[in-house]
Amino acid sequence: MPFLSADEWTAVALSLQVSLWATAASLPFGILVALVLARGDFPGKQILNGLVHLPLILPPVVTGYILLVTFGRRGPVGAFLEEQLGIVLAFRWTGAALAAAIMAFPLMVRAIRLAIEAVDPKLEQAAGTLGASRVLVFATVTLPLILPGIIAGAVLAFAKAMGEFGATITFVSNIPGQTQTLPTAIYAFLQVPGGEASALRLVIISVAVAMTALIVSEGVARLVARRIRGT
Amino acid sequence: MSLSVAVTHRFPGFSLDVAFEAPPGVTALFGRSGSGKTTLVNAVAGLIRPDTARIAVNDTVLHDSAAGVWLAPHKRRIGYVFQEGRLFPHLSVSANLAYGGWFAPRGAVEPGERERVVAMLGLGALLDRRPATLSGGEKQRVAIGRALLSAPRLLLMDEPLAALDDARKAEILPYLERLRDETDIPVLYVSHSVTEVARLATTVVSLSDGRTTRVGSPAEVLADPRAVPTLGIRDAGAMVSAVIRRHADDGLSELDGPGGPLLLPRIAAPEGTRVRVRIHAHDVILAREAPAGISALNVLKVTVAAVRAGEGPGMVVQLDAGGERLLARITRRSARALEIAPGLACYAILKSVAIAPEDIWIASGEETGAS
């Protein structure tokens, strides 16, 4: 691609890879947690709610540091993953995806939770009397009805993941080709003399990706909502 | 017995203790709001779990707290028609109808059943539409079809017409009558409308403050002066059957009624048809002597069967007219003046125009009577 240098292109591709994985891998958890928060009634619900929203409030560098001490090679979870499963997150793109997923998680959960809360439980009750078990009620009634919310949540999470900086750079550093995503690449280019042109090109890409994501998500969500309402 | 129910449940400030057995057909649960109807149907559907219960449909026990049997709602196969339809907005009418069949045991929905239900409820033109584009009456018809096509053991209808205006009710009632006459699925029908109960029910279970006050046929229950407080004095009135003898030229139909001829506004049914007529208690006038020079066209010879005083100025008189029961609501003052007492022979006077069209309907499965 003539517009971008090889290094810049690597950062863009890596960012897309990290964000897509972060979104896709966290989506099932996002739906589950949203469901529990919207419909569940149990002690400790507020604590779960707080934990989910914590990355939104904490300084990203703190989240990154917590990830580092937990999922780093010497951290309790990181050591376990490496010894038992051979998975290393620290200073790898997978770690960047984990950081992005955690930072984007509150936005994803929030959008899906709102959609679930808008579903009339009476419809689910009706589906139950028609013979559908709880899992099938979810699959045939709840899930289709909250699809616009899921799409909105996923796109929002993707956009947030594309822009994640603080937690990523703290947890997995800024290694070109390994962990250097769009924002950390922009940061790196701004640190070296003559890097402004590269930084500017990446900024333009950032803006384009964010705008496209928002427009596409709005359009798709509206289309799906219209299809679901049947109007 | 096709349906047997015994439920006790205690809420703060309210207790439900109801037991009844009902033969096949439509069993109407009748009572004012707060009498425990909805709690009872939700217990039958498994949506709430009462303190103690034994609920069985035909040979299937749905809940037996003594034996520790409790079927989850989705395993009960109860077609629940809710007051507000509750159609799935993301599915077409066709898919809504198919929904229950997806989870019914294989072969439970007989081939051709769908076509039959679609024809019976007049849904053919709606199949490709979405619920959002349907009228209230259409929605309710689809909801009934959806419940029917889930191969239910029992249909549960919780005031399915309550959210509709009178015109829509009149549109759906004939479908419900066909449903009762053309299928052998037992129906538990919750209502506080005397008209619906009179037209549809095979058995009436009347509830009051969480207790069963009366179980019987609609003719018995509606003609029972003791049931009047439950029915509401404005709605009280018995039901008689009559056969259309002739349609007169002046817009009236002449019928052979209980204890004599009956003249009613023109009925859209052929001569010889047996109809049921609901006569509101407050439309009946009593006279000790045969009246003369009076505009009312119907004068029936009756005998006072029972008298029941209410709380207000009125009282309810049960009358025997040729073996059928009528109710009349008169004031205590009139009752005193006329010396109304059981055994008294008198005349019941009824204006033809007092009978509204929705209070006359064709008796089911009894086309001929006079010929």
Image (spheres, coloured by chain):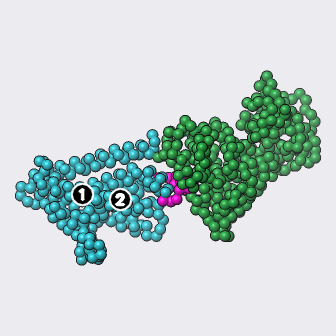
Q: Please tell me whether residue B293 is drawn above or below residue B28 in the rendered image.
A: above
For discs 2 and 1, the disc positioned in front in the rendered view: 1
Taking depth in this image into account, of B56 and A52 the one nearest to the observer is: B56
- Of all chains in the rendering, the one displayed in green is B
Taking depth in this image into account, of B36 and A144 the one nearest to the observer is: A144
Task: Identify the residue shown where x is 75% and y is 51%.
Answer: B203
Disc 2 is attached to a residue of which chain?
A: A
Task: Identify the residue shown where x is 42% and y is 43%.
Answer: A227
Residue A109 x %, y %: 37, 59
Residue B218 x %, y %: 77, 47
SS assignment for the magenta stretch, majority: helix
Q: Which residue is mark 2?
A: A27
Residue B207 x %, y %: 72, 55
Report the span colored magenta.
A119-135
Taking depth in this image into account, of B136 and B89 the one nearest to the observer is: B89
Q: Which residue is mark 1?
A: A17
